[in-house]
Amino acid sequence: MVENRPFLTFLTHAFLILGFLVVALPVYVAIMASTHDVSTLMSGPVPLLPGSHFIDNYSTILTSAAAAHGLPNYSHMALNSLIMALTITAGKIAISILSAFAIVYFRFPFRLLAFWIIFVTLMLPVEVRIMPTYKIVADLGMLNSWAGLTVPLIASATATFLFRQFFMTVPDELLEAARVDGAGPMKFFRDILLPLSRTNIGALCVILFIYGWVQYLWPLLVTTDPGYYTLMMGMKRMVTAQDGVIEWQLVMAGSVLAMLPPILVVVFMQRLFIRGLTETEK
Amino acid sequence: MDTKRTTFNNRLLPYLLLAPQLAITLVFFIWPAAQAVKSSFEREDPFGFSTVFVGLTHYRQLIEDPNYLDALWRTAVFAVSVTILSMMLGLAFAAAVNRVTRSARIYTTLLVWPYAVAPVVAGVLWWFLFNTSTGLLPFFLERVGIRWDHDLNGTHAMILIIIAAAWKQISYNFLFFLAGLQSVPQSLIEAAAIDGSGPVRRFFTISLPLLSPTTFFLFIINVNYTMFDTFPIVDATTGGGPAQATTTLVYKVYQDGYVGLNIGSSSAQSVLLMLIVMLLTFVQFRFVERRVQY
């Protein structure tokens, strides 16, 4: 700080603490609601102190609650979410690092065209091509399959650009030395480029894991078989009450559990997360 | 666009390396987009046996459809409100964290996690908080004379999705503003302090103008986010209602196409949305070029 202003510093802390409380309010209320029974929640505004049904509610959501809505087990949906998030993460990183390697380390006809085709994906989010993409996935027989859930999502312009940018900063001498020693392109890629990209891969993993975990519209389009439902779709089903009563204590318990994995990833890998966020979006 | 000074000279290998990415892009991005453009000019008979070329009919119908124009206007209001709300809060938090160097890390941790909350979960959380029978906020609003009811009142429903969408985006804006503030040269701040300007004045006359590239960049990103990534919030809470009051453009494409099976109109809407994303992406990348060169 340039000058010492104790009062202003005090105000700053007060503002930040207040801000945190406001930002955390919906999650705090969700946690509190998940510890009460349905009659408490129905009889007035949600209590701001924990109740005594914590174990009840969480064991119900983990065992039987989802089945009442025609959904698979909660743990089954959580596993689906995890598989989907991890596959998308691994797939995006693998195909992006290979394309970036091709674009930076080779000269070949149509190189620029390839770059632009990859760039165009930025302009075509799922949301603007819902029907035709659904149709092509249906025509390829990929509805209700892991391939349909993940493969169309693993093209990534941002990850390719990140790796391209990073490869451009790798000193040329490394390549020359590798060539002098007789290393071919794939050996150079595996033994030199890949180890150097570790931090970037880590940062991307954090961002892409969150991206995969929170996917909603795509699974909604391509899966009708409950066996493939992810947590995000389960949440939506559970708030669409069939007989008019939403069991909020269970919905909130489910929400708390569903947001836990990505939040833990962000909090414990904060440095990689910030790096990934500020470098992929340029 | 450059390569390395020295490159490998295999002929086939680069194509093999690019193949997976290009195949997915062509099959699941470019082909469907081309299909959308094609079917926006066609009308399919009710049984799907034949299609007729109808030119710009679908587009003309959209432009004359008050429902579509309403959705366009609502999306603009939604996008601008979310952007302004989340950017102002993000900037305020960033400025505050930037002042308290010693505890900056802790506060950053406390403020970044909402980014990881799925939009659908964010929607459900705020929906519960505003729920008319058990929610906390309607209870307090009632005391100041506001009868909150997002199931019947379109404005209330819109406020609900604006708050839920903005809440999720604060952490993103916060991180970018904080990075921007940390790169403001300390010498400028010190010089201004010696000349006698206080912290608030320094913020408005030095930091804020120097942040303008970040601000502009975030504006585009946030508009993009609100238009396209908030589908789950709308779908899980208001479902576009009451009486279309929260039907955004993306939600309308989904409803008309996937639910209502009106392919021609839905495709024309998709094409118009593509033009909007292209414009936003173009502006964003033009700007990035300049930011790199200062």
Image (spheres, rainbow, N blue to C red):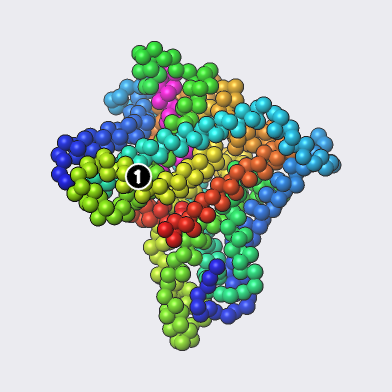
Where is residue B287 shown, x and y percent of the image?
49, 53
Q: What residue do we see at 23% from left, 52% from top? A: B191
Q: How many marks?
A: 1
Which chain's residue wears label 1?
Answer: B
Magenta residues?
A: B113-135
Where residue B16 sits, quadrant-wise, is: bottom right
Return the residue nearer the eye: B197 or B58.
B197
Secondary structure of the residue carrying numbered label 1: helix
Q: Is residue B31 above or below residue A114?
A: above
In reply to whether residue B12 is colored magenta, the answer given is no
* Residue denoted by label 1: B208
Where is residue A89 shown, x and y percent of the image?
48, 55
Where is residue A255 shown, x and y percent of the image?
42, 35
Return the residue nearer the eye: B288 or B188.
B188
Return the residue nearer the eye: A275 or B101.
B101
Q: What residue do we see at 51% from left, 56% from top? A: A158
Most common secondary structure along the magenta stretch: helix
